[in-house]
Amino acid sequence: MCQYHSKFTEFVDGLREQRSALNKQQSLLDKKISNLYHDLEGIEPAEEFALSFVKQLHGTLKKRRVIKDEIARLDAVLRPVMDITENVEEAVKSRKRHSKRWQHDFKMTMTLEEVISEN
């Protein structure tokens, strides 16, 4: 049973890590947008600057939109998984207690791998 829990935990951890990485990327893009706005406030824009500024801002906003879309896709999976994670943890703890009692009461000494390898 521990292998199932380990795989579940790895899956959840992977989703959390991906969410964190996407958040960091979004934060970097937000800082770039903020810097562009600060640059714009501090100068008297000429036509050549305006075109360069709009291109930079447009490209950055498009990248940010891609990141936000991916976060929304990830959250569609992560949020329900996080809702059930506590239930899974409680169920695993309960099952481990039962397993220990069964192992003791029924003198279970064989492992699953041993049983499977015999067949």
Image (cartoon, rainbow, N blue to C red):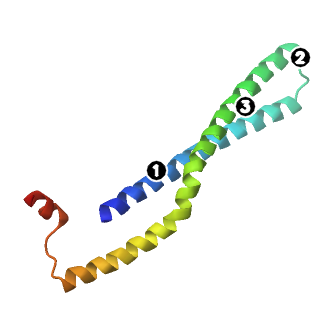
Q: Name which of mark 3 and mark 2 comes first in the sequence.
A: 2
* Viewer-side residue, 86 vs 116: 116
Callout 2 touching callout 1 (CB < 8 Å) = no
- Furthest residue to the bottom? 105
Q: Name which of mark 1 and mark 3 comes first in the sequence.
A: 1
* Viewer-side residue, 24 vs 75: 75
Identify which amino acid the numbered label 2 is placed on.
Ala
Q: Quadrant of the C terminus?
A: bottom left
Classify residue 61 as left or right of residue 90. Answer: right
Callout 3 touching callout 2 (CB < 8 Å) = no
Q: Residue at x 54, y 60 (%)?
A: 82
Identify which amino acid the numbered label 3 is placed on.
Leu
- Furthest residue to the top? 48
Residue that numbered label 1 is attached to: 14
Local crowd size for mark 3, using a 10 Å CA cut-off: few (<14), some (14–19), many (≥20): some
12 above or below 63?
below
Callout 1 touching callout 3 (CB < 8 Å) = no
Classify residue 38 as left or right of residue 80. Answer: right
Classify residue 18 as left or right of residue 59. Answer: left
Q: Residue at x 42, y 72 (%)?
A: 91
Q: Distance between the residues labelled 2 and 1?
A: 47 Å
* Viewer-side residue, 9 vs 87: 87
63 above or below 97?
above
Q: How far apart are marks 1 and 3 (CA)?
A: 27 Å
Residue that numbered label 2 is attached to: 46
Q: Residue 61 has which mark?
A: 3
Q: Which residue is drawn at 50% across and 64% down?
A: 85
User: Percent x, y for residue 48?
Assistant: 83, 13
58 above or below 99?
above
SS at circle 2: loop
